[in-house]
Image: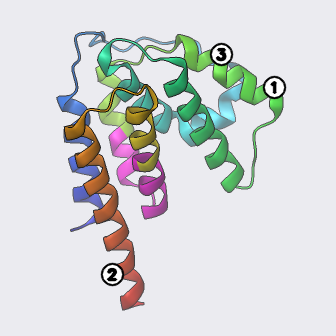
């Protein structure tokens, strides 16, 4: 299975989440100017994971902490770690973020052009977000775990061909 198909399955999964809590029209939430670098690099991760965390009506602190840790790890792994003030400002931003379903498609399109490692990191973070509030939904956990397994299998298959 190709990376694009796996990302498409992830998009379908996110589309199946309850959307009664979201506006369908994009809103321009004020992304802090000091975080522009992180928005360019990780804005699509933030939207995808925040939509998932809010699919049950609210993003509890544990879910937001997972998203924050994911973003800080990704920034660190890119060689441009976030400062302590950036981390604090991003945490504040995540507390008030209310992404819209209109932001889903552009975020998925951007993820489709990412690396396998990036997609695996987002799916791993999605599993942690779903699990963070202690309300495990077996269907979600099974889907995300299967998707992560398929991504790793794709990675291993490509490595064996190299």
Circles 1 and 2: CB atoms closer than 8 Å: no
The answer to whether residue 59 is above or below residue 158 is: above
- Please provide the residue range marked out in magenta: 108-123
Report the magenta stretch's main SS: helix
| Residue depicted at x 65% and y 22% | 91
- Could you tell whether 102 is left or right of 113 in the image? left
Q: Nearer the viewer, residue 84 or 35?
A: 84
Q: Is residue 17 left or right of residue 79?
A: left
For label 3, the crowd category at 10 Å Cα-Cα, with few meaning under 14, some 14 to 19 and many 20 or more, is: some
Q: Earlier in the sequence, mark 2 or mark 3?
A: 3
CA–CA distance in space, label 3 to label 1: 11 Å
Report whether residue 34 is seen. no
Q: Give neighbour class at mark 2: few <14, some 14-19, many 20+ (Cα, 10 Å).
A: few
> Residue 92 — which label?
3
Tell me which corner region of the image, top left, top right, bottom left or bottom right, holds residue 141: top left
* Marking on residue 68: none
* Residue 140, x across and y down, in percent: 25, 38
Residue neighbourhood size for the residue with mark 1, other residues' Cα within 10 Å, grouped as few (<14), some (14–19), many (≥20): few
Q: Secondary structure at mark 3?
A: helix
19, 107: nearer the viewer: 19
Q: Name which residue lies at 47% across and 43% down.
A: 125
Name which residue lies at 26% across and 13% down: 24
Q: Earlier in the sequence, mark 3 or mark 1?
A: 1
- Assess whether residue 149 is covered by the magenta stretch: no
Q: Quadrant of residue 21?
A: top left
Q: Position of residue 116 (x, y in %)?
A: 42, 63
In whole angstroms, how far apart are the C-alphas of marks 2 and 3?
41 Å
Asked if residue 115 lies in the magenta stretch, the reply is yes
Label 2, on which residue? Answer: 157
Which mark, by number, is residue 85? 1
Quadrant of the snapshot with the C terminus: bottom left
Q: Residue at x 71, y 50 (%)?
A: 76
């Amino acid at each position: 299975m190709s990376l694009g198909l796996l990302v498409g399955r992830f998009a379908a999964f996110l589309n199946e989440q309850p959307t009664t809590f979201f506006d369908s029209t994009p809103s321009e939430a004020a992304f802090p100017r000091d975080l522009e670098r992180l928005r360019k690099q990780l804005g699509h991760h933030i939207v995808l994971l925040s939509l998932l965390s809010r699919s049950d009506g609210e993003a509890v602190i544990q879910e937001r902490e997972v998203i924050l840790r994911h973003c800080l790890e990704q920034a660190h792994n890119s060689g441009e770690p976030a400062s302590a003030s950036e981390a604090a400002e991003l945490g504040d931003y995540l507390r008030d973020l209310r992404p819209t379903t209109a932001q889903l498609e552009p975020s998925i399109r951007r993820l489709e052009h990412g690396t396998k490692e990036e997609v695996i990191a987002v799916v791993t973070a999605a599993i942690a977000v779903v699990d963070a509030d202690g309300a495990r939904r077996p269907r979600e956990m099974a889907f995300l775990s299967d998707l992560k397994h398929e991504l790793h299998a794709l990675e291993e298959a490509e490595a064996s061909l190299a």
